[in-house]
Image (tube, rainbow, N blue to C red):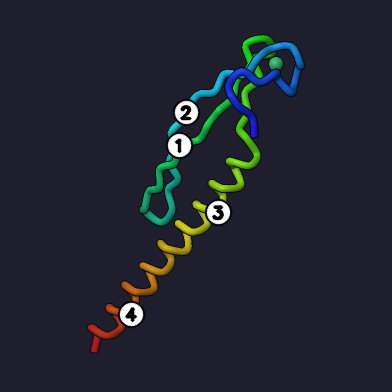
Amino acid sequence: MYKQGDTCPICGRGSLKATKNKEEFEYKGNVLSLELTCYSCKVCHESFFDNEEMKVHQKTVKDFHRKVDGLQVHILNIHAKGCC
Ligand SMILES: [Zn+2]
């Protein structure tokens, strides 16, 4: 995990500045918004995300997809029941 003020792992000279970025993921018309921490270096102008945080978010996105798919199956069942 990186944190604000850490030495930049890219150039080893600058210190990291953490900023919160809001990211929106859309899946089948449903939107999930997440807050990602973006780290940037003033010396080499590199910016990157924290790997551990990305792993957590990937899981959240996967769960979101599963939830959306679950909802769709539910809607399809209702349609199937109502048609005859
Ligand atoms: Zn740097």
* Label 1 SS: strand
* Residue 5 drawn above or below residue 73: above
Query: Which mark sits nearer the N-terminus, 3 or 2?
Result: 2
* Residue 83 drawn above or below residue 69: below
| Residue 77 image position (x, y, % from top left) | 33, 80
- Label 3 environment density (alpha carbons within 10 Å; few <14, some 14–19, many ≥20): few
Give me the residue at 74% from left, 21% from top. Answer: 10
- Which residue corresponds to mark 1? 35
Instruction: Determine whether label 4 and label 2 are within 8 Å by CB.
Output: no
Q: For the residue marked with disc 2, what is the amino acid?
A: Lys
* Label 3 SS: helix
- Which residue corresponds to mark 2? 20
- Which residue corresponds to mark 4? 77
Query: Which mark sits nearer the N-terminus, 1 or 4?
Result: 1
- Which residue corresponds to mark 3? 59
Query: Which mark sits nearer the N-terminus, 4 or 2?
Result: 2
Q: For the residue marked with disc 4, what is the amino acid?
A: Asn
Instruction: Determine whether label 1 and label 2 are within 8 Å by CB.
Output: yes
Query: In front: mark 3 or mark 4?
Result: 3
| Front one among 73 and 56 | 56
Give me the residue at 61% from left, 47% from top. Answer: 55
Q: For the residue marked with disc 1, what is the amino acid?
A: Glu
Query: Which mark sits nearer the N-terminus, 3 or 1?
Result: 1
| Residue 82 image position (x, y, % from top left) | 23, 83
Q: CA distance from mark 4 to mark 2?
A: 40 Å
| Residue 6 image position (x, y, % from top left) | 66, 21
Q: Going by the picture, which residue comes out furthest to the bottom? A: 84
